[in-house]
Protein backbone atom coordinates (compact mmCIF):
# COMPACT_ATOMS: atom_id res chain seq x y z
CA UNK A 1 0.00 0.00 0.00
CA UNK A 2 2.89 2.35 0.74
CA UNK A 3 4.26 1.65 -2.72
CA UNK A 4 0.98 2.83 -4.27
CA UNK A 5 1.15 6.11 -2.32
CA UNK A 6 4.73 6.66 -3.42
CA UNK A 7 3.83 5.93 -7.04
CA UNK A 8 0.86 8.32 -6.96
CA UNK A 9 3.07 11.00 -5.39
CA UNK A 10 5.69 10.57 -8.10
CA UNK A 11 3.09 10.75 -10.86
CA UNK A 12 1.55 13.91 -9.41
CA UNK A 13 4.95 15.55 -9.09
CA UNK A 14 5.73 14.59 -12.68
CA UNK A 15 2.48 16.21 -13.81
CA UNK A 16 3.32 19.37 -11.89
CA UNK A 17 6.78 19.45 -13.46
CA UNK A 18 5.19 19.07 -16.88
CA UNK A 19 2.93 22.05 -16.28
CA UNK A 20 5.80 24.21 -15.04
CA UNK A 21 8.63 23.17 -17.34
CA UNK A 22 8.24 23.86 -21.08
CA UNK A 23 11.16 21.54 -21.95
CA UNK A 24 9.79 18.39 -20.33
CA UNK A 25 6.85 17.86 -22.76
CA UNK A 26 9.34 17.70 -25.62
CA UNK A 27 11.10 14.87 -23.79
CA UNK A 28 7.77 13.05 -23.66
CA UNK A 29 7.52 13.26 -27.47
CA UNK A 30 11.09 12.56 -28.49
CA UNK A 31 12.26 10.12 -25.82
CA UNK A 32 9.13 8.38 -24.58
CA UNK A 33 7.00 8.62 -27.73
CA UNK A 34 3.98 10.11 -25.92
CA UNK A 35 2.41 12.46 -28.46
CA UNK A 36 -0.53 14.85 -28.29
CA UNK A 37 -3.63 14.30 -30.41
CA UNK A 38 -3.40 16.20 -33.70
CA UNK A 39 -5.61 19.24 -34.22
CA UNK A 40 -6.31 18.12 -37.81
CA UNK A 41 -6.82 14.38 -38.21
CA UNK A 42 -6.94 12.38 -41.41
CA UNK A 43 -8.10 8.88 -42.19
CA UNK A 44 -6.24 6.84 -44.80
CA UNK A 45 -8.72 3.97 -44.90
CA UNK A 46 -6.90 2.01 -42.23
CA UNK A 47 -5.96 4.34 -39.38
CA UNK A 48 -6.29 7.90 -38.15
CA UNK A 49 -3.22 10.04 -38.64
CA UNK A 50 -1.97 13.58 -38.26
CA UNK A 51 0.93 15.65 -36.94
CA UNK A 52 1.71 16.04 -33.26
CA UNK A 53 1.21 19.72 -32.38
CA UNK A 54 4.12 19.62 -29.91
CA UNK A 55 6.92 18.10 -31.98
CA UNK A 56 5.50 18.07 -35.54
CA UNK A 57 6.08 14.34 -36.07
CA UNK A 58 3.59 12.36 -38.16
CA UNK A 59 1.63 10.18 -35.72
CA UNK A 60 -0.88 7.33 -35.99
CA UNK A 61 -3.62 6.31 -33.60
CA UNK A 62 -3.63 2.76 -32.26
CA UNK A 63 -6.69 0.66 -31.40
CA UNK A 64 -6.76 1.99 -27.82
CA UNK A 65 -6.78 5.64 -28.84
CA UNK A 66 -3.13 6.40 -28.09
CA UNK A 67 -0.94 8.32 -30.53
CA UNK A 68 2.46 6.96 -31.50
Image: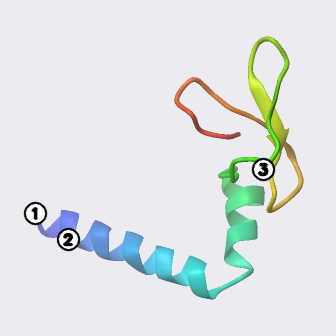
Can you tell which mark lies on residue 1? 1
Q: Is residue 39 left or right of residue 36?
A: right
Up-down relation of residue 6 to residue 43 (above or below): below
Q: Measuring from the top left, give residue 64's x and y in whole percent.
A: 52, 29
Q: Residue at x 74, y 79 (%)?
A: 23
* Quarter of the view holding residue 61: top right
- Give the tally of numbered discs: 3
The CA distance from mark 2 to mark 3 is 35 Å
Mark 3: secondary structure: loop
Which residue was labeled with disc 3? 39
Residue 43 place in picture, x, y as percent: 80, 23
Quadrant housing the C terminus: top right
> Could you tell me how far apart the alpha carbons at marks 2 and 1 are, in whole angstroms?
7 Å
Q: Give the residue number, with chain letter if any, for mark 2.
A: 5
Q: Are marks 2 and 1 in contact (CB under 8 Å)?
A: yes
Residue 17, picture quadrant: bottom right
Task: Tell me which label, 2 or 3, sits earlier in the chain.
Answer: 2
Amino acid sequence: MVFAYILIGLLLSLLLLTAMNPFLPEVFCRVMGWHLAPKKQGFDGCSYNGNCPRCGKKVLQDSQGNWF
